[in-house]
Image: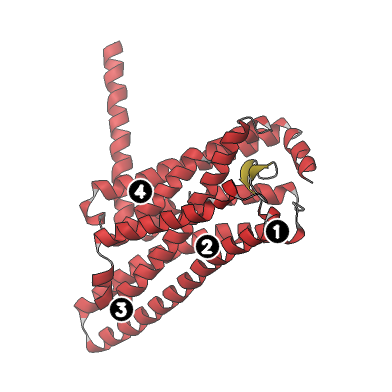
Amino acid sequence: MTESLSVELATRTKAVEWTEAVLLAVINIVAFFGNFLTCYAVYRNQRLRTLPNMFVIALGVSDILMSTFCMPFTVVTLFHGRWMFGESFCRFQGFGALTFGLVSMGTMGLIAVSRYYCVVKPEKYIVLFKKQRALLYIAVVWCAALFGSLPPIFIKNGRFEFQPGKAMCLYTFESNIAYTVFIECVYVAAPLTIITICYAKVFRTVSRSNQVFFQENTLQQLRANVEEAKVTKTLAAVMVGFTCCWLPISIMDNIDAARGEHTLPRQAYLTYAFLAYLSSTVNPFIYGTTNRQFKREYKSILRMTVCFRSQNNNNSSNNNS
């Protein structure tokens, strides 16, 4: 089946080659600049330098790294129809993709837990989620992700190798069931369970609080509660977007692991790769549509960039004349 997928990758028509490569290149560019824009918006606007946005930046950094160290290899592979970077870069891409994916999942879990304490148990939130501690939590997430992604480098049964259907190097999950079960349970199922429970309790608490504040006509507390609800909805939307991308990926990995080989059609595996990379692209759009402060800052930065480029073009025209 792997040989068949390799042949399909190498024998595509020029139109298909260009379509796939250009589409992924666009995703690559948007992922990099979108997440860079998010990080710059927080850096530029002091009002955005909140503790929840520290986790947003952590998520953005992992997405920037994915768009820098993983996506370009796949773009070139789709353009040329074969892997042309050697075994060392193959391991590098596979390790990076797995690590950044686990970091994103762990950061999502961390965001959900922080929202739970902020809304449901605010007295503990003040103690547990200070800025220095938040940095420590982010570091722990990275260490845990590295712990999960390092075994394929050392274990005998299973390794990072080029998968032609996905046009990228990844761990062969079907080669070591024990490791696959470990990743799926500890790094996928557990965080998703925690995220679901946390957000369910958060939205239930917000709904009850709004009713109480409205009945008591406590407008100031109601406004504060509404603001927390808006932040929570934005972060929950990020989680939903991430889950929509990674749930089909997890299902395909489990199918291959159960069957012991790649048995799905190339279109399914190509969708797998696009979804993995798309998950690093959607967050800036979510912030821009659900958070007014981010939306205003995005517009301000883009307007400033356009004006700067226009001024440079005018200066260069004047110099030429």
**Is 110 situated left or right of 151 in this image?**
left
Q: How is the image coloured?
A: secondary structure
How far is mark 4 from mark 3, CA to CA? 29 Å
Tell me which residue sits at (68%, 51%) in the image.
Answer: 157
Q: To which quarter of the image does residue 13 belong?
A: top right
Label number found at residue 38: 4
Please, what is the three-letter code of the amino acid marked with disc 2?
Tyr
Q: Are marks 2 and 1 in contact (CB under 8 Å)?
A: no
**Is 44 situated left or right of 257 in this image?**
left
Please, what is the three-letter code of the amino acid marked with disc 1?
Ala
Q: To which quarter of the image does residue 78 belong?
A: top right
- SS of the residue under disc 3: loop
**Is 105 situated left or right of 257 in this image?**
left
Label 3 belongs to which residue? 121
Tell me which residue sits at (28%, 72%) in the image.
Answer: 125
Label 2 belongs to which residue? 187
Q: Are marks 2 and 3 in contact (CB under 8 Å)?
A: no
- SS of the residue under disc 2: helix
Foreground: 74 or 12?
74
Label 1 belongs to which residue? 257
Please, what is the three-letter code of the amino acid marked with disc 3?
Lys
Please, what is the three-letter code of the amino acid marked with disc 4?
Thr
Residue 265 in percent (x, y) is at: 75, 50
Label number found at residue 278: none
Q: Of label 3 and label 1, which has the lower sequence position?
A: 3
